[in-house]
Image (cartoon, helix red, strand yellow):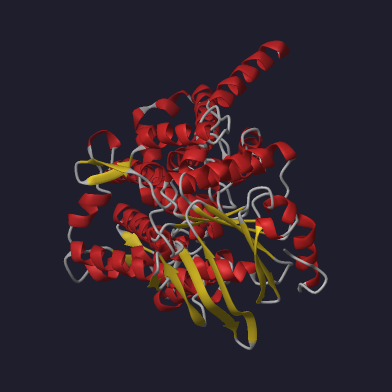
Amino acid sequence: MEHQGTPLVQMEGITKRYGAVEALTDVSIHVDRHEVLGLLGDNGAGKSTLIKVLAGVHPPTTGQVYFDGKPVLLKSPADARKMGVETVHQALSLVDIMTISRNFYLGREPTRKFGPFSLLDTRKMGQECRDVVTHVGVRVRDPNEYVSLLSGGERQAISIGRAMHFGAKVLILDEPMTALSIKEVRIIVKEIEKAKDEGAAIIFITHNVHHVYPIADRFTILDRGKKVCDLDKSQASPEQIMEIVATGNMDSVNVV
Amino acid sequence: MDTKETTLWSRLLNVATRFRHRPEVGVILAFVVMSAIFSILSPSFLSLRNLTGMFTVVSELGIMTIGITFIMIAGEFDMSVSSVYALGGFLFVTLANGMNSLLAMAIVLLGAVVIGFINAMVVLKTRIPSFIATLGMMMFLRGVLLAITGGKSVKYIGDSIVPAILSTRLPLGFRPSHFWFLGLTIVFSVILMRTRYGNWVFATGGDKAVARAMGVNTDRVKIINFMVSSVLASLAGMMVITRFWIANASFGQHMELEAIAAAVIGGTFLTGGYGSIVGAFFGAFLMGTVRTGLVMSGAPAYWYRAFVGAILIIAAAINLKLRSKEM
């Protein structure tokens, strides 16, 4: 296809130390356009630390991130966002006591010039936001409704829709299905598939293999800061992956 | 009789419900009701002379309330405004008695910026709750002011430029401070509701972690809003002393609580992330209405605080009720 060989994102030999604690040891992952990578591991495996490096929250102690084959330095979340890395996190995506449209544009508000003053383009904020939100399957009567009225699934759908609307190339989903109803999980699955079709590289973080197995193409499993294995979907069943996540090694599993 | 009252009440509530996504609805209703009551109790309540007189006191409290509302929406308190108000006025008199009053005013405003910055730094660096940090600043500044002045008043003998800009009486009892209050209400309301910065203020107070994750520099928002709160308090302080032509270190004691009460009556959350400058405007006006209305209907002035206390509780309860249906 358009980029033979080099995946969109490569993280090579990432090690992260917090003082004496080594949270990540020499971990490498990669994910390409039109691809969903399931990043699995038990609590404390280092999943969050790894994606925080990619999102520019913490720089790695050693190791290098490549974007389109070129080494990049991600010093802040703003740097990462400029590269097209968007993180969707249940607790960190929307402000409850703000309206949907004000949330949708938070940090990227469109403005119009009125003489020397730049004022919010509220009409655009209302219309565009309504279109995107309706498109992701959330039935909203009014973009001026408060986010606190939305269900967990609706929030996740809006967050993903927002990331894609603002041109996300890499979509990091941090436990996007935890505490969602079955119906809502379906909406989110559809959303993720849509983002994949549009060309996003998606990293789906979870400790529950059943959430990610149906939509992932590949899996990377971490345990206590180290990578256990990379697997293609054809290599292992959900039960086998769950076993690897639970034990932290591949001793009891025969993968193809 | 009873049923009539309930239908009127339910109608009012109906209107309030329809517009309930506006934080200022409750206070505007309360303002209309209180004004109606007082104009019945005392016919001269609605006289232009009384209204402009009320406007004067309301403007000084109201300008402080705008600043308080701005910082409260960003999720912090500023208790030091009452001391900045007194210090600003006193410093202005001392300076302007020996130099051009415009220059003196500029220095005072700059000083207020510095105090706001210090407040913000103390809160951001030490992570002390801003209520405590600015309470300390309030006591510190008031104490220093009282100690240095020995409680003596100082007469204003400077030029009349700044008094003319801020307070000197105009025809029909109007004063420049009235227009300052109106203008600042409009300016800060537009900033809050119609600019990117305003959106960041709401987000900072609503959920700091989300605001940060979305790229908002929440520390910067807080620093700026602490400065605004301090600057507006010092402006109000200069207004009151150019009205009386005298400064005293005891000016404005407990005014920070009145301003916070006016902000809360105006629909602003104590927990941050929600509020309105227009609400602050009417909140300050409601307090002024109650104050002059009580005096004019012959009640002893002491009742003012009791009334404000009762209104505060009722307003907070009503605002919460209106909000709970939609948030």
Residue B307 is left or right of residue B280, and the answer is right
- Residue at image position (52%, 40%) is A99
- Does any portion of residue B212 appear in the rendered image? yes
Quarter of the rendering occupied by the C terminus of chain B: top right
Pick the front one: A251 or B191: A251
Q: Position of residue B179 (x, y in %)?
A: 29, 41
Q: Is residue B307 visible?
A: no
> Is the residue A255 above or below the residue B313 in the image?
below
Above or below residue B310? Residue A18 is below
Question: Image quadrant of residue B144?
Answer: bottom left
Q: Name which residue lies at 63% across and 83% down.
A: A22
Write down the quadrant of residue B101 in the picture: bottom left
Q: Nearer the viewer, residue A2 or B6?
A: A2
Furthest residue to the right? A252
- In the depicted structure, whether residue B123 falls above or below residue A174: below
Quarter of the picture holding the N terminus of chain B: top right
Q: How many marks?
A: 0
